[in-house]
C-alpha cells in the first residue's frame, strides 16, 4: 500500500476510498475488510429464495389485473394436456 493510500484511509476512516490507477485510469475502491464483507453479503446472496417472501408481493403487484373484468374466464381453462 502506498503512503498516499494510507493517508486517504486515515482521512476517511470506515469509508470507501477511491483510487485511480495512473497507468490504466481504472478506478478501484478501498474498503475495510469487514465493510467489504457486509457489501458482498448484500450483493452475492446465494441462498435459495423463500417463496413465502416474494409470492405475496407478486400477488399484490398483479391483483388489479387478476381482478379485472373478464379475467375470471381464465379460471375455467384446463391445464395443457388436459381436456377442457
Image (spheres, helix red, strand yellow):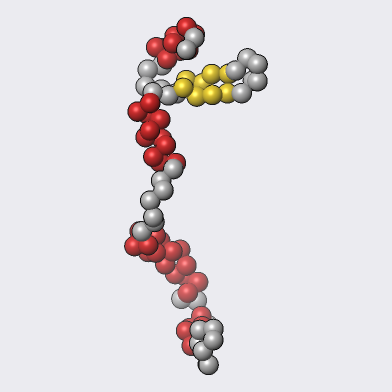
Q: Residue furthest bottom?
A: 83
Residue 76: image location, x then y, percent: 48, 88
Q: Residue at x 58, y 18 (%)?
A: 20
Residue 36 found in image quarter: top left
Residue 72: image location, x then y, percent: 48, 83
- 9 over 71 or under it: above or below: above
* Relative horizontal placement of residue 50, taking residue 16 as reference (left or right): left
- 20 over 52 or under it: above or below: above
Between 34 and 12, the residue placed more toward the observer is 34
Q: Residue at x 54, y 83 (%)?
A: 80
Q: Residue at x 54, y 18 (%)?
A: 19
Between 32 and 59, the residue placed more toward the observer is 32
Residue 35 found in image quarter: top left
Residue 23: image location, x then y, percent: 65, 16
* Relative horizontal placement of residue 4, taking residue 45 as reference (left or right): right
Between 49 and 69, the residue placed more toward the observer is 49
Whether residue 26 can be seen here: yes
- 62 over 22 or under it: above or below: below
The number of numbered badges drawn on the structure is 0
Amino acid at each position: 500500500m502506498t503512503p498516499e493510500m494510507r493517508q486517504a484511509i486515515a482521512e476517511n476512516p470506515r469509508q470507501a476510498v477511491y483510487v485511480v490507477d495512473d497507468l490504466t485510469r481504472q478506478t478501484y475502491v478501498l474498503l475495510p475488510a469487514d465493510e467489504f464483507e457486509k457489501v458482498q453479503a448484500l450483493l452475492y446472496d446465494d441462498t435459495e429464495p423463500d417463496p413465502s417472501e416474494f409470492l405475496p408481493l407478486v400477488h399484490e403487484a398483479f391483483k388489479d389485473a387478476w381482478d379485472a373484468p373478464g379475467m375470471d374466464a381464465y379460471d375455467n381453462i384446463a391445464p395443457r394436456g388436459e381436456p377442457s
